[in-house]
Image (tube, helix red, strand yellow):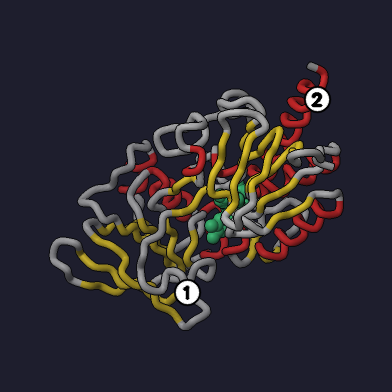
Amino acid sequence: MPKKGKKMVHKLIILGSGPAGLTAGIYAARGKLSPLIIEGNKPGGQLTTTTYVENWPGEKKILGIELMEKIKKHAEHYGTTFLSDSVIKADLSKKPYTLTTEGGKTLSAESIIIATGASHKKLKAKGEDEYWGKGVTTCATCDAPFYQDKEVVIAGGGNTAVTEAAFLTRFAKKITIIQILDKLSANDPIRDEVEKDPKIEIILNSAIKEIKGDGKKINVVVIENQKTKESKTIPTSGVFVAIGFKPNTDIFKDQLDMDEFGYLKIIDHTKTSKEGIFTAGDVSDYKYMQAVTSSGFGCMAALDCETYLQKQKKS
Ligand SMILES: Cc1cc2nc3c(=O)[nH]c(=O)nc-3n(C[C@H](O)[C@H](O)[C@H](O)COP(=O)(O)OP(=O)(O)OC[C@H]3O[C@@H](n4cnc5c(N)ncnc54)[C@H](O)[C@@H]3O)c2cc1C
């Protein structure tokens, strides 16, 4: 239990209830750290926004939401407690660290694991929200097999877009890249392959304005040329949005080291630039961005935190 007295100090507070936060919860609870998870405004994290997950070990095919409920129950079983709230302010200037929530709570912790994930930048196209997870996706590694012999479009022209396009050529029969600029902005060497691939068409100076379907699946996207303002309809079964991510780190600005895009800097494995503050998952990993890698990262953060708290106890 957290120390009681004048002020309750939690041994560990975990921010985020995606695969990283929940796995950290399982390990920390089994390590007797009595973790509290603050769930945030997306309980269960990004996987709750998709339909089926086919790459979680031990589950051939499972709904994202069902998988996350199972992991939450696992964490609860070993004693993790949950707070349905979001952190809006963090004071990491002195120990114990202080977190303020949207619901008006002020919480103190000896250590923190930040597993707040990253948000995908959206197209802001009509129909995008309606078909999010039902044809609109952000992850070719996750969803490409669903588009075997189908036509898909990719929004974006940077490194993520060309990498996703190259990956999708193994599955889709046609891939159309819709890039808002007048050239691909990718500098990855894979760009040359993509430009030459007969399966890939690149449409420049254009933006997706609308995603249309029958309510269950996508049929077409409407694109608009930014120069001529002409509209065109492209048949497609899927829309891969690859226009960038924003890590959810605003509340730690000027308190923790971050890279130019706002991803938390890792000093050693899961340690951030401040003692007792650890990180896990997409909030600091822009390379792998998978549920299973985030989960593994959460395990590492909990183990590192356990070691840290043990050392603190001895000193
Ligand atoms: C449509 C889609 C399909 C995908 N499909 C797959 C797939 O099939 N397989 C796969 O491996 N990966 C898939 N992914 C990627 C995978 O979902 C992510 O890599 C993974 O969820 C990252 O886990 P995370 O725990 O780091 O962060 P997230 O899942 O993003 O969770 C972040 C958590 O932090 C919380 N949070 C944010 N801000 C605060 C705050 N201020 N205070 C408290 N809490 C906060 C949120 O509420 C959320 O619970 C998919 C992603 C998307 C979007």
Q: Report the amino acid beneath label 1.
A: Glu
Viewer-closest of 186 and 80:
80
Horizontally, residue 91 falls left or right of residue 62, namely left
- The residue most toward the bottom is 214
Residue placed under numbered mark 1 in the picture: 130
Quadrant of the image occupied by residue 61: bottom right
Horizontally, residue 55 falls left or right of residue 221, namely right
- Point out residue 106 in the picture as x, y percentages from the top left corner: 64, 47
Quadrant of the image occupied by residue 266: top right
- Point out residue 163 in the picture as x, y percentages from the top left corner: 43, 46
At a point 26% along the width and 59% down the height, the residue shown is: 203
Q: Report the amino acid beneath label 2.
A: Gln
At a point 57% along the width and 24% down the height, the residue shown is: 267
Marks 1 and 2: in contact by CB < 8 Å? no
- Point out residue 148 in the picture as x, y percentages from the top left corner: 53, 64
Judge the density around disc 2: few (<14), some (14-19), many (≥20) Cα neighbours within 10 Å: few
- Point out residue 291 in the picture as x, y percentages from the top left corner: 64, 49
Residue 310's disc number: 2
Say what secondary structure mark 1 lies in.
loop
- Quick one: label 2 or label 1, which is nearer the N terminus? 1
Horizontally, residue 138 falls left or right of residue 126, namely right
- The residue most toward the left is 228
How far separated are the C-alphas under marks 2 and 1?
48 Å
Question: Mark 2, mark 1: which one is toward the viewer?
Answer: 2
Quarter of the figure with the N terminus: top right
Viewer-closest of 258 and 192:
258
